[in-house]
Amino acid sequence: INNQYIKYEPEIIVEVVSETTQVTDYVDKYIDYTKIPSLIYYIIAEPETTLITVYEKDETGNWIARKFTNYNDVVKLEKMQIEFQIRNIYLG
């Protein structure tokens, strides 16, 4: 319960994939993570190409996927009042 690295009711999970974890992140973890009642966003970032996939739980409990591939795209996580530009992820 006091482990600082484990959160039991996360609202957002972010993964950076690699070749060896790509299938796990997009399939296995997606299935597991979307079962977490508190989760609102599951975000996957591709390090080798400009691609951010944002899965967002809607009001009915369905998960909607949005993909961002342009440096000028702005990702808005409205339910958490967060937004960021893709360029800030890839260019630092």
Image (cartoon, grey):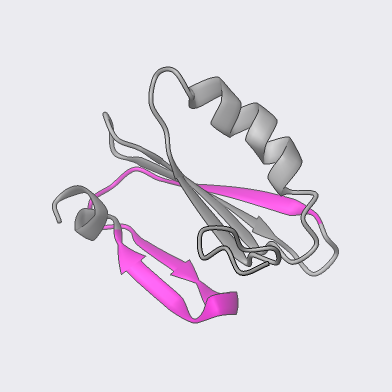
Q: Quadrant of the C terminus?
A: bottom left
Residue in view at x 51 percent, y 58 percent: 5
Is 42 one of the magenta-colored residues? no
- Region in magenta: 62-85
- Using residue 20 as the reference point, say whether residue 72 is left or right of it: left
Q: Is residue 87 above or below residue 17?
A: below
- Using the image as rendered, state which of residue 36 and residue 53 is in the foreground: 36
Residue furthest right in the image: 60
Q: Quadrant of the N terminus?
A: bottom right
Whole-percent x, y for residue 75 in the image: 41, 63
Is 69 one of the magenta-colored residues? yes
Q: Is residue 40 above or below residue 83?
A: above
- Using residue 77 as the reference point, say whether residue 59 is left or right of it: right
- Using residue 85 as the reference point, say whether residue 32 is left or right of it: right
Whole-percent x, y for residue 91 in the image: 14, 51
Residue furthest left in the image: 91
Q: Is residue 23 above or below residue 58?
A: above
Residue furthest bottom in the image: 81
Whole-percent x, y for residue 26 in the image: 58, 31
- Using the image as rendered, state which of residue 90 and residue 14 is in the foreground: 14
Whole-percent x, y for residue 38 in the image: 74, 66
Residue in view at x 39 percent, y 72 percent: 83
Residue in view at x 28 percent, y 47 percent: 70
- Using residue 90 as the reference point, say whether residue 60 is left or right of it: right
**Rendered image quadrant of residue 59:** bottom right
Q: Is residue 58 above or below residue 13?
A: below
Residue furthest front in the image: 2
**Rendered image quadrant of residue 39:** bottom right
Q: What is the total number of numbered labels drawn onto the structure image? A: 0
Residue in view at x 59 percent, y 26 percent: 24
